Image (tube, helix red, strand yellow):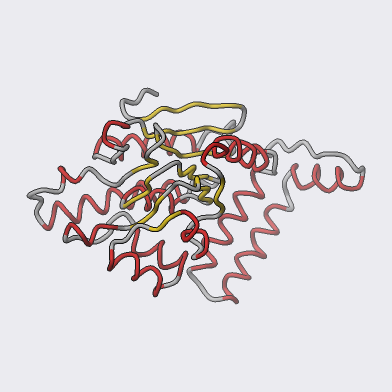
Amino acid sequence: MSYENLLVAREGAVATVTVNRPNVLNALNAQTVDELRRAALALKVDPAVRVVVFTGAGEKSFVAGADITEFIGQTPGEGRDLAVRGQHVFGIIEGMGKPTIAAINGFALGGGCELAMACTFRIAADTARLGQPEINLGIIPGYGGTQRLARLVGPDRALDLILTGRHVPAAEALAIGLVTRVVAAADLVAEVTTFAQTLASKAPIAMRYALEAVHRGLDTTLVEGSAIEATLFGLVSATDDMREGTRAFVEKRTPAFTGT
């Protein structure tokens, strides 16, 4: 599958999707969002891919937001449709059923911060800056930012970022729970690669069920979430990977998971 604004590379079971518009700090225009949709759907159903990394081209920016030129003059209906399309694409990324990592190598603002929040993990360079500055344009986050940010950092901190539009450095983003970890910029690729390879070595079906249990459980009560967990625990007990994993533990060897 070919793309104009993305680079997709694979190394073993890890795929890396790079937003490749460095001349505009990797801003997300409509075409790029659609290419992200196509890439995510293709990688979601590819059994050879166990982990997906999202990043941006160049050293300055992960994704510095949406392409604001496309917002000028839009009608209320067009604005709603634009938001729904973006939410749909980021929902696909969040629901891939395999771990995703945002390798935040620079600015992650607006739609870029929303893309990062749709990923399972966010590993940021110490030079990165994150934020939802849409208020400065007279608009609000539209690709899921108001919802995911509040779930990650709590409503008070989310509203602080959304209503002021301020950018936060990586260290503050880590302190409030917006990113998973912060590493030296020079070490970002190596750290993400190591982490992705570790995740790729785990049992894919168990990984998918664990992701499902957490995501579904967050939207329900503890009792209902526990019932979801028990059902998925039962389902994973029928897999070859479960038998391989338990045998490998008893035999004191590294398991070889096949995703079956």
Query: Is 211 positioned to the left or the right of 55 in the image?
Result: right
Q: Residue at x 50, y 36 (%)?
A: 45
**How many tags in the picture?**
0
Q: Position of residue 87 (x, y in %)?
A: 33, 53
Residue found at the far right of this picture: 251
Q: Residue at x 87, y 47 (%)?
A: 249
- Which is nearer the eye, 237 or 94? 94
Q: Quadrant of residue 63?
A: top left
Q: Residue at x 40, y 63 (%)?
A: 149
Query: Is 102 positioned to the left or the right of 246 in the image?
Result: left
Query: Is 125 positioned to the left or the right of 91 in the image?
Result: right
Residue 178 versus residue 48 in the image, above or below: below
Q: Position of residue 199 (x, y in %)?
A: 65, 43
Q: Quadrant of the N terminus?
A: top left
Q: Residue at x 77, y 36 (%)?
A: 256
- Which is nearer the eye, 1 or 239? 1
Q: Position of residue 229 (x, y in %)?
A: 64, 64
Q: Quadrant of the C terminus?
A: top right
Residue 109 versus residue 145 in the image, above or below: above
Q: Position of residue 93 (x, y in %)?
A: 44, 46
